Amino acid sequence: MQPRGFLLYGYKFQPVVIGLNDKPMFQPVINALCCLVLFWMLAADTRAQNRGASDGLTTLVVSSSFDSNLLPDIEVTLLCTSASPDRLVTRMKDGSDVEWPVTVSSVQTNYCQIYAAAPRGFSIEYAAGGDAQFKADENGCQYAEVSAAQVNHCEIEVTQDHVPLSVYKKWVGATGDEGDVAVTLDCDGGVSESPKFINQGLPATWQLSNIPPGGMVCSVSESQDDSFISDESDCKELLLIPGRGEACTMVNTKVVKRIEMLNRYGKIIMILVMLTAGLIAVRRYV
């Protein structure tokens, strides 16, 4: 007679006939191993179902702020691990917002980073927040342990760096007692700066901002008097562009005044001598 088996989770286990008088006996070790394999398969299937149910969308919101007169737009990049998509790139205008939906894994640790490309002459500051662990530094907005249904945001602020314009002084024929000279700066668009005082070894520097993308033309002039002759040619029509400073030199030539050698009595004597010489010359030809 064939021994009867049994069903366990849809799998049929059949007794093994060994021994004497055809009496069926189960092999305990083999059957125990079969049960362990079955439970492992069921556990793996459960994990896969839970993973499929937990994988989902997370949202990253990016906002930008900068002067659109100085910068038309900026390039912003999103990088994520264990997510789909794992990289996104877009261009943003001032005051705009972008929402990036990203599908993240439930069984792996997810990291995301948002950063912008800084044009030359500009600086970027980041501020991060949201449901994940976050921080913001010079590398952008960074998020750890990003999971489904979270909302995280990143604020990007772009500002233009100041552009220096330095003015130097050079004296020709100096005696060492030359005083400071006032210089003024005038640029395109009616931009002007407060006067500064310079001298040889004592330059002055203006820090300029709000320079348009095509640059700004500036000229420096100085107050003059009759003690020197000024050469301002090196400081005219200087082109300033974001991220690059300028420098020029004012050249002043000292004017040496005639030293008066005679007092008023000496002048009278000189006049009489000249008159006498003139009369003698006249009488010679009369």
Image (cartoon, rainbow, N blue to C red):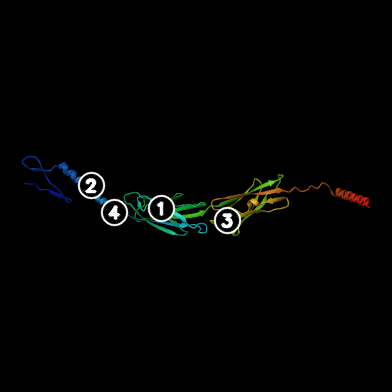
Query: Who's the residue at 18% across and 45% down the image?
Result: 34
* Dot 3 alpha-carbon crowd within 10 angstroms: few under 14, some 14 to 19, many 20 or more: some
Q: Check disc 3 and report its element: helix, strand or loop.
A: strand
Q: Nearer the viewer, mark 1 or mark 2?
A: 1
Q: Nearer the viewer, residue 112 or 136?
A: 112
| Separation (CA) of disc 3 from disc 4 | 58 Å
- Mark 2 and 3 residues: CB-CB less than 8 Å, in contact? no
Q: Which residue is mark 4?
A: 52
Q: Earlier in the sequence, mark 1 or mark 2?
A: 2
Q: Amino acid at mark 3?
A: Met
| Separation (CA) of disc 4 from disc 2 | 18 Å
Q: Nearer the viewer, mark 1 or mark 3?
A: 3
Q: Check disc 4 and report its element: helix, strand or loop.
A: helix
Q: Which residue is mark 2?
A: 40
Instruction: Find residue 146 and report its horizontal and vertical position in percent.
Output: 36, 52
Q: Earlier in the sequence, mark 1 or mark 4?
A: 4
Q: Nearer the viewer, mark 1 or mark 4?
A: 1
Q: Earlier in the sequence, mark 1 or mark 3?
A: 1
Query: Who's the residue at 49% across and 54% down the image?
Result: 158
Q: Which residue is mark 1?
A: 78
Q: Earlier in the sequence, mark 4 or mark 2?
A: 2
| Separation (CA) of disc 1 from disc 2 | 39 Å
Q: Which mark is residue 216?
A: 3
Label tally: 4
Q: Is residue 133 left or right of residue 2?
A: right
